Amino acid sequence: MSTAPRRPSMGDVAARAGVSYQTVSRVLNEPGIVRPDTRDRVLAAIADLGYARNRAARALKTSRSSLIGVLTDGSSLFGPAETTTAVEIAAREAGYSVLLTSMPPGGQGADQVGAELLGSGVDGILVIAAHAGMDPAVGAVAQAAPVVAISAQTSAEAGVEVVGIDQGRGACEVVAHLRRTGVRSVVHLAGPPDWFDARARRCGFEAAVTAEGLDAEVLGSEDWTPRSGYELTLQVLERGRPEAIFAANDMMAIGVLHALHERGLRIPEDVAVVGFDNTLGAEFLLPSLTTVAQPFAEVGRAALGHLVELMDGATEAAETPRALPPRLVVRRSTRPERTH
Amino acid sequence: MSTAPRRPSMGDVAARAGVSYQTVSRVLNEPGIVRPDTRDRVLAAIADLGYARNRAARALKTSRSSLIGVLTDGSSLFGPAETTTAVEIAAREAGYSVLLTSMPPGGQGADQVGAELLGSGVDGILVIAAHAGMDPAVGAVAQAAPVVAISAQTSAEAGVEVVGIDQGRGACEVVAHLRRTGVRSVVHLAGPPDWFDARARRCGFEAAVTAEGLDAEVLGSEDWTPRSGYELTLQVLERGRPEAIFAANDMMAIGVLHALHERGLRIPEDVAVVGFDNTLGAEFLLPSLTTVAQPFAEVGRAALGHLVELMDGATEAAETPRALPPRLVVRRSTRPERTH
DNA sequence: TGCGTCGATGTGAACGTTAGCATTCAGGCG
DNA sequence: CGCCTGAATGCTAACGTTCACATCGACGCA
């Protein structure tokens, strides 16, 4: 670093352009109000000096940080990662930067995370991959700044708006598809019960199998891993053989495929398999996996848009869609639908 | 939002505790210097009011933002996601927050991203998943703030320190392992040539096959997707059948497995397959995949530690290890090693 | 020619914090 | 008893920006 030659300030730009610093400020904030030749001179000076506005000073004066906090689970899952990226890009386009905060593993320290997020002065908060463990952190900040959660949960905590993908509908479409392929019995391997998405998929599944009159069973998992899918499948097979297994996400489905293959069962002839997420690679599993594609990027953009509306003070109900539809992707791991 | 009742300031805390705001500042910054009973009173007032320091004011006065910029590719890949999380946690422990910035897809706007990062006043920058497309952005900021890149490239751009995983060594171990299983010919499906990691794996591969005297060929890809792995494998098979295929990452390996299976080839008896990354799920592919596990979390922590050293002004060579060793994970997609 | 008006720019103050120096007070020593 | 020392605390200024208001000049119209 040595003696860093101090970044140029508005004063420096002003001196070089022969105007006052206020004019520089105006060029940056309301370009229309300043005379074209003056503006050009200022812009030239800015370019020469490589000037960039001091975010801290700006935030201090306006009491708006142009920062949005993104609170996410630390679990490198495909969906959250996709969503985070989409949020970041949308935020940049809206003039915000993203302060990334991940929940510490193990679940403790949640309220501390909330306090930090609050202290960092973010203008709003977006919660990604919401699960129950985040509630303390979210609750702590919801009073001080608008919060939007990307979640399946519709009735949310006080002050928290929810934008999400209609997980229940996704599960429902899976069941309907299985039904049309002639499946009569299906087992759902549910995700961790404290994750809202997992709950919603499970609920959707239960409602759908009742409506369709299928023979169904649900087994719960503690995580989203392939290993869970593998072990639960072995458990299932000990008790009998369903005609289909619906895993709560693609990772678990990988474990399901592995277990079935190990037991010499043919997919989908003996057991059909369905996942959820349409992870990169699902298409090339063996066999390629029928799954539910979620519009992660779209939901990220929608959630950010809604958050921006809230931050801009629009308290009224917004135009943003709140529940985006997922899309069933049929591949080789389920039997062809009967055209009857 | 309505009329948000303005977050409490030091002045408010001071009034409540019956001291001057300077004393409050001291309690926060140098607790030792203030008398215990005064300190307790101040701390009580802080707790009562739910006071949190204003980051912007602090940053303005100290000209340190306590922010580190994390520049990453927007590509939701497993490795980068893992690394990002690890960096965030390590940063929080070191008293920094993470400003996330992803490269816009398509590659244009790189210098604009750099300028924004610079303008946001970060104290240092960490580049994750470095590829050549990031160079303009990195170059733009390297003069103003310390930059550490997590990359395979050892001779980096001026002013950019590099911490990484020894990709070449990983490739080398793969080749040695294949050799020990009796493989004589191997094809490497290289990753995108503008990614430093891909280049390093390729170089390591080429050096190793020369040293081991194997019959080798390299095919390049434009991305890291399963589809590329699939299509390149079909190309390979048209020209002959190697005894092994080494994909540049696990995603591509998924495509390889799929293509081989489609052509009725047995894995590993006809063709052995190796991936790279040890993605969640690699263990449960069919067959479970031999691959190279990278210590993503560890490298994230190491890189952040090094960056903090640089920001603290340690210009001298640091103690942080610069190249961490990957670890070969042998599974069923390669033949057992000969004990000869 | 003088006055009002409006557009363009300059000046002063303030955001909340920290650094530097000034002040206060208690206690020890000559 | 007065002075010095040091610990504890208070006061002032400044960081770079934006907001509110003041100023300046030019132009139009009577």
Image (cartoon, coloured by chain):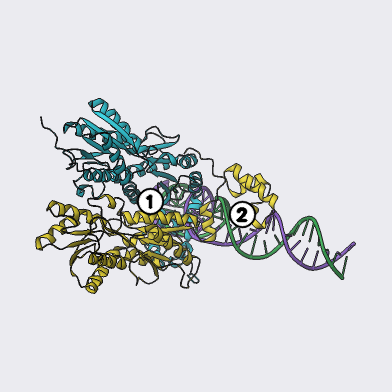
Chain colours: A cyan, B yellow, C green, D purple
Amino acid under label 1? Gly
Amino acid under label 2? Ser
Q: Position of residue B246 (x, y in %)?
A: 22, 62
Residue A95: mark: 1
The residue lying toward the viewer, choosing from A330 and B137, is A330
The residue lying toward the viewer, choosing from A317 and A44, is A317
Q: Horizontally, is A68 left or right of A93 in the view?
A: right
Instruction: Count residues near mark 1 (Cα–Cα under 10 Å), then give few for <14, some for 14-19, many for 20+.
Output: few
Instruction: Determine whether the residue tagged by mark 1 lies in a helix, strand or loop.
Output: loop
The residue lying toward the viewer, choosing from B332 and A163, is B332
Q: Chain of mark 2?
A: B
Give the vertical position of A259 relative to B85 (above or below). above
Instruction: Determine whether the residue tagged by mark 2 lies in a helix, strand or loop.
Output: helix
Quadrant assignment for the C terminus of chain A = top left
Identity of the residue drawn at 20% across and 49% down: A284
For label 2, the residue is B25
Question: How far, Cα to Cα, is label 2 from label 1?
Answer: 32 Å
Identity of the residue drawn at 60% across and 53% down: B28
Q: Position of residue A100 (x, y in %)?
A: 41, 51
Q: Please indicate, yes or no, whether residue B28 appears anywhere in the rendered image.
A: yes
Q: Please indicate, yes or no, whether residue A320 appears anywhere in the rendered image.
A: no
